[in-house]
Image (cartoon, rainbow, N blue to C red):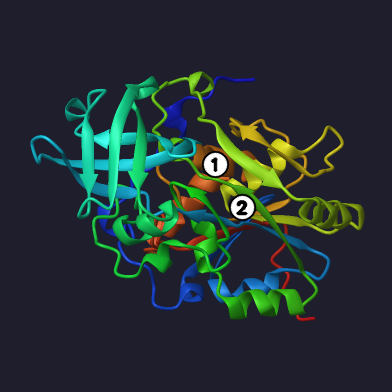
């Protein structure tokens, strides 16, 4: 296989197309339809997606819940401001964290949050300069976090989020993500009801999104890029729904790259799933053969990111980059709070 360069996935994105705020109505975002086989493009509104789903299809959603994981604190001894981002729970009250500024967080450093309702001590420095911290508090950690924590919005969003729930899907259930599975942000309860009423099954899987998802690819040869490990869980109910869909000739449509990476990580050689939980470092790029996913609903991603590479694996790099150029021309909104794209195998409306 020819060598894939990071620069093969570059495109020039005007700054003003990066969405800073969520739309009032989640399902009113725009939707670009891309035929993954021939590159045809159509423009719609997200709620029109119902017309392009067929009875017998299965929609796979990631029901992870974002932790309000950004904490603003001060050093106990000097009062210097310090920002802590919770990345991964290691055990009970010990978390792997990202600290800014790192030089102020040597082992032994104590940090106070709020009026002292939450405290932390830096235990050690681990890979990539992350800190292991032990937290102490009164009551229930999640409740304390809910009061003090802010949503860990990506760095390209500079506006303050007025309503925490807008960086959360409406079906978010299991806490553990450092970032939202953003393709799911377009769904409302009403839209999901219409989808299910049409005879489309909905399977919920869980993948706790780590910040590694957004880590830039540094290696010019993308095969040298190392993905970070993320925890996923596929229930028996989800596995059964997906297996039944495949067996009956329906399409498995993943909502977001995280749902895709979950089912592809969990797939057996014959493309079937069983109940399982594990950690995955799967990296999907052109040349990958999908075992489970047929179609993908996703947002528009950063240039040269692993997410653009995954989308290109499904529809081909040239087709994807051409669709991105058209989205830029049509002034689509990009990234987490932006518009969506449906990589499908058919533009035929289904009016059943």
Q: Quadrant of residue 275?
A: top right
* Camera sees residue 298: no
In the drawing, what numbered circle is on residue 210?
none
Callout 2: SS: loop
Q: Quadrant of residue 132?
A: top left
Asked which quadrant contains residue 305, the reply is: top left
43 up-or-down from 179: above or below: below
Q: Position of residue 76 (x, y in %)?
A: 15, 38
Q: Is residue 57 toward the left or the right of residue 160 in the image?
A: right
Q: Give the residue at the far left of this rendering.
A: 78
Q: Write down the residue under mark 2.
A: 39
- Residue 202 at x, y = what percent? 73, 64
For the point 69% across and 53% down, which residue is it? Answer: 295
- Tell me the quarter of the image containing the N terminus: top right
Distance of label 2 from label 1 (alpha carbons): 9 Å
Residue 309 spot, x, y in % from top left: 53, 37
- Relative to 303, is 37 on the left or the right? right
Tell me the residue at 29%/54% (across/down). Answer: 157
Marks 1 and 2: in contact by CB < 8 Å?
Answer: yes
In the picture of the structure, the residue carrying the numbered disc 1 is 318
Position above or below: 82 against 219 = below
Callout 1 crowding tier (Cα within 10 Å): few <14, some 14–19, many ≥20? few
Which residue of the protein is positioned furthest toward the front in this rendering? 138
Give the tally of numbered discs: 2
State the SS at label 1: helix
- The residue at 29%/38% (across/down) is 120
- Image position of 337 with respect to 218: above or below: below
For this rendering, which residue is in front, 322 or 156?
A: 156
Q: Position of residue 174 (x, y in %)?
A: 57, 55
């Amino acid at each position: 296989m020819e060598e894939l360069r990071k620069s093969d996935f570059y495109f020039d994105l005007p700054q003003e197309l990066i969405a800073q705020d969520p739309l009032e109505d989640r399902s009113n975002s725009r939707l670009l339809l891309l035929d993954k086989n021939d590159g045809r493009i159509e423009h719609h509104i997200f709620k029109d997606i119902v017309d392009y789903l067929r009875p017998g299809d299965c929609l796979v959603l990631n029901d992870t819940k974002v932790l309000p994981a950004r904490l603003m604190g001060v050093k106990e001894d000097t009062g210097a401001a310090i920002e802590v981002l919770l990345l991964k729970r290691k055990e009970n009250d010990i978390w792997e964290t990202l600290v800014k500024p790192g030089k102020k967080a040597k082992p032994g450093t104590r940090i106070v949050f709020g009026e002292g309702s939450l405290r932390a001590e830096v235990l050690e420095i681990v890979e990539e300069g992350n800190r292991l911290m032990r937290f102490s508090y009164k009551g229930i950690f999640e409740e304390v976090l809910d009061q003090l924590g802010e949503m860990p919005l990506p760095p390209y969003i500079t506006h303050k989020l007025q309503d925490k729930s807008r960086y959360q899907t409406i079906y978010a259930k299991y806490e553990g993500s450092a970032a939202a599975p953003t393709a799911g942000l377009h769904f409302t309860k009403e839209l999901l009801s219409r989808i299910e009423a049409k005879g489309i099954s909905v399977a919920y899987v869980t993948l706790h999104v780590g910040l590694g998802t957004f880590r830039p690819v540094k290696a010019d040869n993308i095969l040298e890029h190392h993905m970070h490990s993320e925890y996923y869980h596929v229930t028996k109910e989800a596995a059964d729904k997906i297996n039944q869909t495949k067996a009956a000739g329906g399409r498995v449509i993943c909502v977001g790259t995280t749902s895709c990476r979950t089912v592809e990580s969990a797939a057996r050689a014959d493309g079937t799933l069983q109940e399982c939980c594990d950690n995955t470092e799967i990296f999907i790029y052109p040349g990958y053969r999908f075992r489970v996913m047929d179609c993908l609903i996703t947002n528009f991603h950063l240039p040269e990111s692993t997410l653009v590479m995954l989308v290109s694996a499904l529809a081909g790099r040239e087709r994807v980059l051409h669709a991105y150029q058209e989205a830029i021309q049509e002034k689509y909104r990009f990234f987490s709070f932006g518009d969506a794209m449906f990589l499908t195998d058919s533009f035929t409306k289904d009016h059943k």
